[in-house]
Image (cartoon, rainbow, N blue to C red):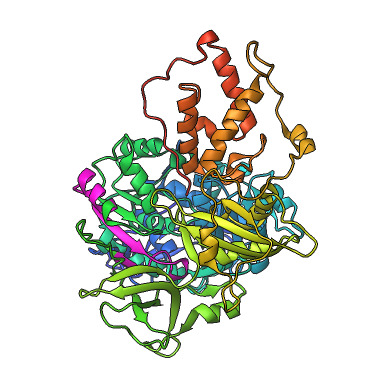
Amino acid sequence: MTAERAGASERGERTRTPAYLVRRTGAAGRVEGFEVSVERADMIAGRTDGTWAPSVSLLEAFLVQADRTPRATALVIGDTVLRYRELADASAGLAARLRACGARPGTTVCLRLEQSAVAVVAVLAALRVGAAWAALEPDLPEARLRALLHDTDCAVVISGRDDRALARLPDAPPLLAAEDLDLTALTEAGTRTAASAAPPVPENAPAYLVYTSGSSGPPKGVVVTRRQLADSVRPRGAVYGTAPSVFLMAMRLSFDGMLAGMFWSFSHGHTLLLPTARELRLAPEFTRLAHRHRATHLIAVPSYYRLLLTGSERLPDSLRVVVVAGEVCTSDLVRTHRAQLPDARIVNEYGPTETVISCTVESRLDPDAERVPIGHPWPGATAHVLDDQLREMGPGEKGELYVGGAFVALGYARAPGLTAERFVASPFGPAGARLYRTGDIAHRDATGALHYHGRTDQQVKIRGTRVELGDIEAALEAHPAVDQAVVTCARPEDGEPVLTAFLTPAPDRTVPDPRELRRHCRFHLVEQALPHRFVALERMLLTTTGKADRRSLAALVPAPGEPACRPAEEDKDRHERTAPPAAAPRPGTEDGPSAFRSTVREIWAEVLGHEDAGPYDNFFGVGGNSLKVIELYSALKERWPGTVRVGELFDLTTIATQAAALEERTASTGDAGLLPPPPARPAPVAYEL
C-alpha cells in the first residue's frame, strides 16, 4: 500500500484534494482507493479536544493516522512491533483473505485466537470488509460457539488449525488457520491488494458481537454498530487526554473494555501496548512490561489493579491515567492508588455490554469518600434512575438505572423477544428513542453523580466477567440426571465469590458425581461460571410461595474442607489411559509418589474447599483458578520449600504430576529432602481475567 500526500495547500484546493490515496491499479488500469481530503484529515486529527466529527468513522480516523504518522509505533505485543503503515497494510492484506472466504457486510468473522497481533489485525480487517467481528477465547465452551454460529451468518473462523471444537460442529464455516497468517506476508500483500474495492459500509452496520450470560437459557449476543462504537470512543479525550500515550490494556480482546483504549489509540496515532497471555497472567511480568515501555495509560478491572498495587514490584511513575472498569471500585483501592501513584489520575468507568464499553465515568475520585461513584454519563449518553412505573427518582432515592442515547447497543442477535424486554421505548426522548434496562440499582447524589447499589436479579461479577446464576442453573438442569438446580453465591470478605450448586435428582436417577457435573458445565459455561461446590438434595428447600428458598440453601453451604457430594469411585480406565508414567518408588519411602499424592490431595482439598479431585483431574477443571493457584503454591511451598515455582503450576495441573515432580526433586537432594532455595526474587503472582 502506498499513501501520497497531495500538495493541496499550494494549489488552494484543500477541500477537494485527497490527503492520501490507497492506490490500487485494477484490471482496467483505473486507480481504486479510499480517499480523504486534506481538510477532512486535518479535522479528524487536529481537534484540540481530541474528538472528531460524528460523520467520521473509526476506520477513517485510523487510516488518516496511518497516513500522517506511518512510522509511528501503533501496536506492541510480545516481540511484535507494528508501525501504523505496517498495521494498515497488514489489515488490508488480511481483508483480501477474508473477502476470498466470503466475508462481506452482514456476515461475521469469528476470532478464536490467543492475545496476538494477528487478532488485532483481524479486527481492523473486518472493519475494512464491513463484516462484524466476534472475539472469543480459544477455550470458550462448545455450546457458546454453537450459539454464536447459530445466531450469526459467520463467514469464516480464524483459529488454530487443530480447532477440535469447530471441527465437531455440523456445517461449520470455513477455517482460516492462524498459523498461515504471517504478518510480513500480509503486509506485503496489503501493498498490492485492492483492500477498499468493496462498496462503502453504512455506519449503522454491525461492528462486533459480544456474548454475555443469559438470566436463563443460552447466552445472548449483544450487537453493536460501527456508529455506536465510534460514539463511545469519540468523547474520551476529555478524560484520557490528547498527549502522545502508550496505552497498556490489562484485558483480553474478548472483553469489550479493550476496545476503548485500542480505538482511542488508533484514532489519535498513539501506541497500543498489549500483554501476552503469560504477561497478563503473571502480575510481576505485567508490571515489568509497563516499565519497559513507559506506559502512560492503563485499563484494568479493579481486582487486577489491586493485585498490581499490592505486588512487590511497583508500577512506573510514567502512568498518567489509570482506568478501572468491569467491577465495583472501592475507596480503599483509590487510597492505595493515591499512595503509590500520586501523579496519576484514577478513573472509574461503568457500563454493561449493552451500553457499548462504558456509559458513565467518574474522574475525580475522593479517597476519603465512603463509596466511589460510577459518575456521570459520557457525552452522547443519558442515564435515568427510575421506579417500576418509569418515573424519575429524586436525589438520594434508589431505583433501577436505565441508559439511553447514542450508547445503547442495537440489541441481541436473533432474539427479538429478549431485545424488546431489555431495550424499551424511552419516555424522555424523541419518537424511536430507546432505553436499556441495566438491572442495576443506583441513586444520584446532590452533585448528580450516580452510585451503584447492586442488582435487581441474581447476576454477579467474577474476575470481571458477568455471570448469571440462572444461566448456571439452566446449564445444570440440561443434564438428564438433574431435576432442579439452584445456585447461590457467597461473597467472602477476602477472595472472589464462591458459587454453590444445590441439585435434586431426576426421577429414578441419582445426582452425578462432581467431576461429571463439571465436565457437563464446561460444555455450556465460561470458566468463571463453573460452580465451586455441588450439594445433592433429596428435595429442594422451598418458601411458602413454592419458590426455592435461597436464604435457607445458603445456610447449607459446606464449610471449607467439608465434603459436599459424595465422590463417585475413580474412573480407573480413564485414569490409566491419561496418566503419565509413574515414577519408580523411592527407597526408604512408603510407596513412592503415592505418599506425595496423599499429601498433595489434602492440600488441594483445603485450597478448593472440597475433596472431589482425583489424581488426574485438572486443577482448573475442579474449581481451581489462577487466584487459587497462589494458595496452592503457598501450601506446597510450606510443605516442600524450594521445590516448585508458581508458574509451573499452570503446567503441572494434576495431583499426579505435582506429586511426581515433588518426588523427583526431593529425591535429587538426598537425605535432606529439599532443594536449595531459588534465587531471591519475588514469586510471580497470577491472575485470571
Q: Measured from the top left, where is residue 378 in percent x and y?
A: 31, 70
At 50% from the left edge and 67% from the top edge, which residue is drawn? 458
The reply to whether the magenta stretch includes residue 357 is: yes
Depth check: give the residue in front, 657 or 91. Answer: 657
Depth check: give the residue in front, 590 or 104. Answer: 590
Is 89 placed above or below 386 here? above
In this picture, residue 343 sits left or right of residue 687: left
Depth check: give the residue in front, 568 or 367. Answer: 568
In this picture, residue 477 sits left or right of residue 462: right
At 72% from the left edge and 24% from the top edge, which residue is drawn? 581
Q: Measured from the top left, where is residue 590 in percent x and y?
A: 65, 18
Q: Measured from the top left, where is residue 398 in percent x and y?
A: 33, 77
The reply to whether the magenta stretch includes residue 224 is: no
Residue 436 appears in the rendering: yes
Range of magenta residues: 333-361
At 57% from the left edge and 77% from the top edge, which residue is drawn? 544
Which of the 4 image quadrants contains residue 258?
A: bottom left
